[in-house]
Image: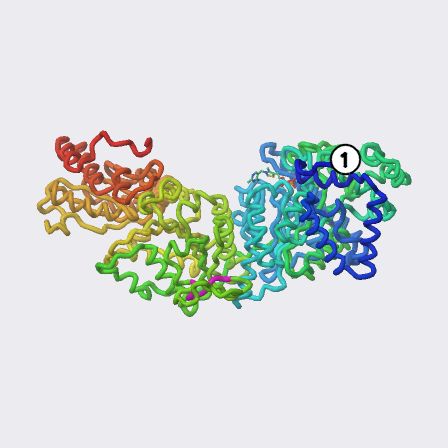
Amino acid sequence: MTDLSDISVSGLWRVLTQDLDPVETKEWLDAFDAVVQNEGAERATFVLRKLLDHARMMRVPMPPVLNTPYANTVSLADQPQFPGNAEIEARISALVRWNALAMVVRANRTHPELGGHIATYASSADLFEVGYNHFFRAGQNGDAIYFQPHSAPGVYARAYMESRLSEEHLDNYRRETGGKGLSSYCHPWLMPEFWQFPTGSMGLGSITSIYQARFMRYLEDRGILETKRRKVWCFVGDGEMDEPESIAGLAMAAREGLDNLIFVVNCNLQRLDGPVRGNGSIVQELEGLFAGAGWNVIKVMWGSDWDPLFARDRDHVILKRLHETVDGEFQKYAATDGRFNREAFFSKYPELQQLVAHMSDEDIDRLKRGGHDPIKIYAAYHAAVNHRGRPTVILAQTKKGYGMGTAQGKMAAHQAKKLEDDTLLAFRDRFALPLSDNDVQALRFYKPAADSPEMKYLHARRQALGGYVPARAPKGLVLPVPPLDSFARLLEGTGDREQSTTMVFVNMLSQLLRDKTLGKHVVPIVADEARTFGMQSLFRQVAIYSPHGQLYEPEDKDELLYYKEAKDGQILEEGITEAGAISSWIAAATSYSAHGVPMLPFYIFYSCFGFQRIGDLVWAAGDSRARGFLLGATAGRTTLSGEGLQHEDGSSHLLFSTMPNCVAYDPAFGYELTVVIRDGMRRMLENQEDVFYYVTVMNENYAHPAMPPGAEEGILKGLYRIREAGKKAGLGTQGSGLGKKRVQLLGAGTILREVLAAAESLESEWNVGADVWSVTSFTELRRDGIGVERHNRLHPTGNQKRSWVEQCLDKTAGPVIAASDYMRTVADLIRTWVPRKYVALGTDGYGRSDTRAALRDFFEVDRRHIVVAALKALADEGAIDAGTVQRAIEKYAVGADRPNPWEA
Ligand SMILES: Cc1ncc(C[n+]2csc(CCOP(=O)(O)OP(=O)(O)O)c2C)c(N)n1
């Protein structure tokens, strides 16, 4: 007996096809057939289950039961009638193929540097065309379609046939800067009226589509929008399925019964470098993976011309041969001709050879894989859209570079884009294109006349399905935002009461949830950290969304703030998946466009597990023109005492500064946070600006002052004076009593309080006047500075502007010292515009566990270090002598023998 224990999963199903006793096998099968025929399928399932349990008890190694044979899931008998005109559709599809090919090859002939892919689309063309002609419903009440990124040329070529793009557009493929170009992949940022969902980075289409399907359910279950009839289609590559993000949401999709979700995996068996599973079978592997996660799996392996072969193959010799074949061989068969296929594949067994004896080599060459047969694809899509209770994956077997002559199935097919004339002519012949040799050589685009049967058919099909796809709505409905004074309670300060900015945020969120107009649009999102951020009160207030409601009595039911789940719950509690949580956030943040309903998502997370963990999804959010708030909590490197290296964030503001449309703030006080969030809502919901916000909040408790009059503008611009030199110490205002010794102290976030304390020390202990400035956003200040610099550069003879940093600091005196809870580079972002000597303190290095006070001492950002830095800056300018600085170092015990924090 074969020892199954050391055989890989992909090898197992092949080994199990070796039948050592066919007679005995037949007896078993006959007995089973009798059960099915006499007692029905249900009884047969029961018997099977019993047998499996019994075998498990006897420790018999199990075959991979999640796998089915290497054949179509939908049987010929269950195949629905194809409702379209197959001939016309084939002609349309051939023309789209040609135009896509011509577009890529043309672009590369003129500009070889441009790149471009055609082999991916060549393999997926029929998968798309069946969708376009029969399934994809358009509009904000239609389907959400996530296209496989490298098939973008085909989507453009289709839009050209539909007269939505012009020849000029196609001619500017990958040349966007002139304003008429087409982006390489699906990018809503670049084509805001065309692409809806960015998928260019492998894996992100998959996870975001899953959470999109779940978000559509959420809208329905909360009574916000009817989404029942709508589907989410996600087209992905088989190689792409290796990305962690591709599979991260599979279990959730099944758990939540997302039968509005259809994955189509284009199994051309190749990725960029070579085969996806040369030594195994990607289709069988994916089948097991999806089935194990609880999905409905439909395999589309073979075209209709295989049906008669399978029908005559009573001994299942075809399947036996297929199961012996690894993907590397299937690829070779794709790259070779009918003659080779006959010899290498069919001639292995006499029975098999016999099955194709009546076929010519050309007939064998024409045998289609399932993903190239619209009839089989239609049957699979039809089964998928009608399946209830579970998401469906369609594993469609195709050939990479299908129809591209010598490039088909070739190892380097992915990057083929410079096709020779003879290959192009062969392509023309292969798809019976109405093009002359000259047309082919000149790569002329082809669109039939408007009154041709093809064009009439194409438009009629799209009209029946509600219009054209993809199409994106760039504007949303305007939602009125409450005025700032409606948050008066949060602007008044806390007196002596100590509170964290996280609590201020939770109070504001709670108020927004109660707002009559805005309330129901708010989407609080957490990844299993609600209690960490003191948000458990919201569990009871608005409940956690669960499509199943709450099937159990929660352990804490007797408590006021119990763990409440409800079908119309408002909180998205994602569990420990930051990738899932941000995907939910993206769905909510783009709802204004995808669904015509603006939503206001707040996703709050440990700031260290934000951009650092899921930066590529944030990038996709920016591309998607997402509008919403990301809250980096327990932010900064020293506010989360005791947690250490992995949890303490000192770089998230730097990372978010890479996002062109992200507006980021690091507020210190409750009123700053309130002003920032209110203005963010105004910009996103009222002004319809395609920006999103990253706001850091802390868990450190301290008293919050009331908002100083007139501070609002500075808070939003990123810098305002919070303390005037001498004022608080009772030494009078600037200039009086403090002589020339003056410094400007800049503080951000939690370190602002250290800066304020340093100012007190400088005045009372060292007779140095200190103005203190609160920096709510170094990144916004930099953005303003860059904008001003650019304006001045391009208008050298015009009115020269001043940056906000310059406007604030120009009229002040003394060196400028900044301190934040982030690495120095964050404060350095504004160095260019600081008009005098500038010293930046920050928390460079790995975080470590300790108390806040010890950490701030370690990273040299506490009040003592700020005083020393200020005195040294004054000494460098000759305003005081170096001995004074040395005295301060000794007084505060911050001498040179300390470990260097970024080396330690
Ligand atoms: C995150 C990421 N990594 C790498 C790439 C580069 N890349 C683009 S397409 C591709 C191969 C895709 O193979 P597959 O998913 O099998 O799709 P196919 O083109 O074969 O249909 C790779 C590696 C990318 N776009 N995104």
Q: Nearer the viewer, residue 634 or 138?
A: 634
Q: Residue furthest bottom?
A: 516
Q: Is residue 608 visible?
A: yes
Quadrant in which ligand 1 is drawn = top right
Q: Quarter of the image for the C terminus: give it.
A: top left
Instruction: Residue at the far right: name it.
Output: 358
Q: Position of residue 603 (x, y in %)?
A: 44, 54
Q: Is mark 1 within 8 Å of ligand 1?
A: no
The residue that label 1 is drawn on is 333
Q: Which residues fall within the magenta stretch?
A: 539-545
Residue most extreme to the front: 58
Does the image show residue 445? no
- Residue drawn at (30%, 57%) of the image: 670
With respect to residue 461, does 579 lie above or below? above
Number of residues whose C-alpha sits closer than 10 Å to that of mark 1, classed few (under 14), some (14–19) or many (20 or more): some
Residue 864 forms part of the magenta stretch: no
- Please determine whether, in this image, residue 100 is positioned above or below residue 462: above
Q: Nearer the viewer, residue 851 or 484?
A: 851
Residue 819: x and y, percent? 27, 42
- Locate residue 644, reporting x and y percent: 35, 41
In this view of the protein, which residue sits in the foreground, 548 or 678? Answer: 548
**Residue type at numbered disc 1:** Tyr
Compared to residue 282, the image places residue 51 above or below, namely below
**Outermost residue, left direction?**
737
